[in-house]
Image (spheres, coloured by chain):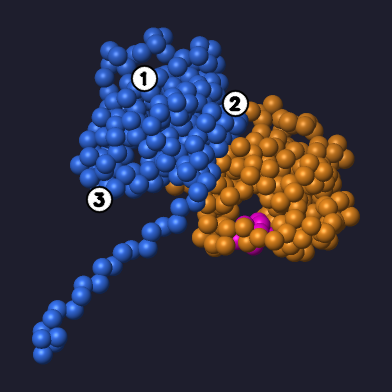
Amino acid sequence: MTIDTSTPPLTLRSAPELLRARAEVVDHWLVEARLRTALCCVVFIAVGAGAYGAAMGWWRSPVQAVFTAVKLPLAILGTTLGNALLNAMLAPLLGLNFTFRQSQMAILLSFTITAIVLGGFSPIAAFVVFSTPPLTLATTRVSPEYGFLQLTLTVFVATAGIIGTVKLLPWLRRWTNSLGVSLRVLFAWLAVNLLLGSQICWVLRPFLWDPNRPEEFIGPDGLSGSFFETVFEALHRLIVN
Amino acid sequence: MNEMNQTPPQMQYTPPQPVEDPADREPVNGVASVIECILRQPKRIHNALRQPGVTGVIGSMVVVSLVCAIIYGVVVGTFSGWPQLWIAPLKIAGGLLVAAIICLPSLYIFACLSGSRARLVEMAGLLAGLLLLMTLLLIGFAPVAWLFSASTNSLGWMGFLHLLFWGIATIFGMRFLSAGFAGTQARSNAGLNVWALIFILVCLQLTTSLRPIIGKSDTLFPGATEKKFFIKHWFDSLDSETNSTRKNNND
């Protein structure tokens, strides 16, 4: 693979270039895998996901907005760091000859695109929050406004996640010259990131609102149970009852 | 006419030989090189195992495997806290070593039955590589396992999660072993597949014989006095957890 060395480095002004994700530009960033590029990605994630988190938390209060603005980027960066070693080992084992730094850079760039898209969605999310009936003492977990907000904000996050992931696939394909290998690596990375990411989000909850508690960065039940246990128990209740 | 009666010359078909990367022939020296090779250039390890003086490579693989197993064991032990923080690493590292020692003779026998020309030391090296790759991947899963250990009180869920991680690691380890086995002129993989099943069953039974690994117990090896098949042990553990959850809910 030939790399154009005249490609500009990733800077804070490179958001449009990152979203375009032209192969030769991204390949250059991947080959170099510089610390400066990684730091730029971290800033993008902090700003993009932070802005979206602030819009989410605003429904409850300004304090919750600050907490969620910190927690959402933390969840993304925590997932990247926590799975760094595993993702770097899975890549060569599945046929993608990436170095440790290159695999981290690929995942970080993908998350950065997700965060930039989330940042772009944040004014819309803020508008949705603004248009939703405000939180009152009468609001419960089954209130329609809470359900609507949960659903809408989750759809935005899922859309941004899908865009970030879809952008990653052609890069992997260029490096492997095989759709099968790139799909295997992408699926493996997605699976392990989903496993850890969902549990980090579980620990950092609430992102929106907990009716039984005041605003807290991490609730007292943060380290009790797991996301998958709760889903399994809910399914079990549905089937048994 | 005579020319017509002559049989045509037999064309000898020689299948195209795979082009070998010269880098795969380079020697493997040192622990870092062993780790790098098993992840990126497994063929280099396979070739190194066929060279004389291979015991250093095998020794490095076994030592790194044990260190990785001990580190993962500490993570497993965080679920119950002290004294499992030292008991779990000991049992996991010891259990893996025992499983490898128990299964090595049958691996060699199945290899010979399959027509393989590998020596016992090469088979030992492949088995050490299997352990190394398994335990390296377990180290990769360690942060995920630790987060769940710190979050949940469910023994059943943690048991499932550790088994899932071990299963994934074993699949990759078996791929390494299978690729090495293919290079030993074995005629079929049937023997290796049977051996893989035996190895998995031995490892699973060892988790029951060495119990408790995740949970706590008053004695170090209750499995020494109360023998159980691993499936029965799993169902017993799930039943006792369901009963205790019901009791807590009723209270």
- The residue positioned farthest toward the top in the image shown: B218
Q: What residue type is labelled 2?
A: Ala
Mark drawn on residue B187:
3
Majority secondary structure in the magenta region: helix
Q: Which of marks 1 and 3 is nearer the N terminus?
A: 3
Magenta segment boundaries in residue numbering: A165-173
Query: Could you say where residue A160 lies in the image, as x and y percent from the top left?
Result: 72, 56
Q: Residue at x 27, y 47 (%)?
A: B186
Task: Identify the residue shown where x is 48% and y is 26%.
Answer: B60
Q: Nearer the viewer, residue A152 or A86?
A: A86
- Image coordinates for residue A89, horizontal then vertical, percent: 56, 41
Q: Earlier in the sequence, mark 3 or mark 2?
A: 2
**Which residue, given by chain and number where applicable, does mark 1 sit on?**
B210
- Where does residue B238 sit, x and y in percent of width and height? 39, 29
Q: In this view, does B78 lie above or below B17?
A: above
Discs 1 and 3 lie in a common subunit:
yes
The label shown at residue A115 is none
Q: Name the residue under label 2.
A: B150
Can residue B215 be seen at all in this image of the molecule? no
Count of numbered circles in the view: 3
Q: Which of marks 3 and 2 is in front?
A: 3
Chain letter tied to orange? A
The residue that appears at 62% across and 48% down in the rendered structure is A98
Marks 1 and 2, how far apart at CA: 23 Å
Q: Please identify which colour was used for chain B in the image.
A: blue
Q: Which amino acid does label 3 sit on?
A: Arg
